[in-house]
Image (spheres, rainbow, N blue to C red):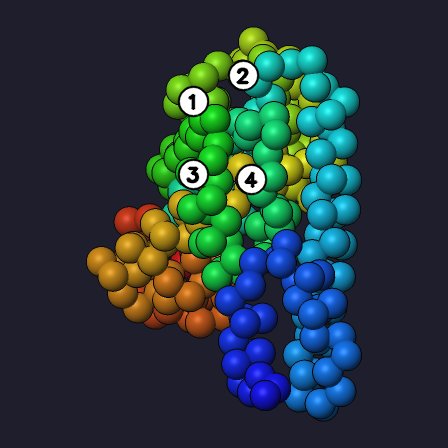
Amino acid sequence: MAEKIGEIKTVFQNAEIHMLPELIRRYATDERSGVRAILKRAEKQLADYERELVRTEQMKEYEKQYGDYAYICGIDEVGRGPLAGPVVAGAVILPKDCGILYLNDSKQLSEKKREELYDVIMAQAVAVGIGCVGPERIDEINILQATYEAMREAIGKLSVKPDLLLNDAVTIPGVDIRQVPIIKGDAKSISIAAASIVAKVTRDRMMEEYDSVLPGYGFAANKGYGAAAHIEALKKMGPSPIHRRTFIKNFV
């Protein structure tokens, strides 16, 4: 007696990706339209997975190029542009045999995907460091210098000292480690992408917490960026303790 289509669907839904080729072969001769649809979805899933393997391998170009270095650290920041909140930097050393898929510029990923990858990165990374510089300091020394400060702090918090830094676009002053600045590095290097995700998730969570203690500005939704509703609230309520005074001169 033939398996019910619902049962076959459950088999495919519960299958690990490496099991799909064998399952596709097993049901290849089943002509029922429901089974054909299941096979078509599985084939697409497999093709998407193969493409992701290739894309991820391409994103290891710099890690391979500098493979003689023992500890390669990716560096990236989040929060240079907002009107409120800190600038946050991430520093991540991934293992040499890193097999994490879907690493990318954090802006290219959904919030759900970033959260998932954050947990994977924190579990698998050799070391992770996070640096955070608040709005008062940003106003005091300007956003570029504050970004460098956050990056140096992130590097300093690593449990393992890196011997090479892959940076997203910048060269960090005051660091005695070899640096390789890469334009759009968060889309070209898995290490920088991982740092981008860690920094983004960390800062987003902070802004959500700020929203609960400083309601009215919509920080949970806008993360401190200059959305229309945020600017309107700023004009109406005035600045909060986490607004960057040098960034809001035109609105207050």
Residue drawn where x is 62% and y is 50% of the image: 102
Callout 4 secondary element: helix
Q: Picture coordinates of residue 221 (x, y %)?
A: 42, 66
Nearest-to-viewer mark from 3 and 1: 3
Residue drawn where x is 77% and y is 40% of the image: 58
Q: Which mark is residue 194?
A: 4
Extreme residue in the front direction: 1
First of labels 2, 4 by sequence position? 2
> Which corner quadrant of the image does residue 5 belong to?
bottom right
Relative to 87, is 166 above or below?
above
**Label 3 sits on what residue type?**
Met
Q: Residues within 10 Å of mark 2 (few under 14, many from 20)?
A: many
Q: Residues within 10 Å of mark 1 (few under 14, many from 20)?
A: some
Distance of label 1 from label 4 (alpha carbons): 14 Å
First of labels 3, 2 by sequence position? 3
Residue bearing the label numbered 2 = 162
Q: Nearer the viewer, residue 166 or 138?
A: 166
Distance of label 1 from label 2 (alpha carbons): 8 Å
**Label 2 sits on what residue type?**
Pro
First of labels 3, 1 by sequence position? 3
Distance of label 3 from label 2 (alpha carbons): 17 Å
Residue bearing the label numbered 3 = 122
Callout 2 secondary element: loop
Q: Picture coordinates of residue 202 (x, y %)?
A: 40, 45
Relative to 38, is 170 above or below?
above
Callout 1 secondary element: loop
Q: Nearer the viewer, residue 4 or 109?
A: 4
Relative to 196, is 70 above or below?
above
Residue bearing the label numbered 1 = 158
Residue drawn where x is 37% and y is 66% of the image: 218
Extreme residue in the bottom direction: 33
Q: Are marks 3 and 2 in contact (CB under 8 Å)?
A: no
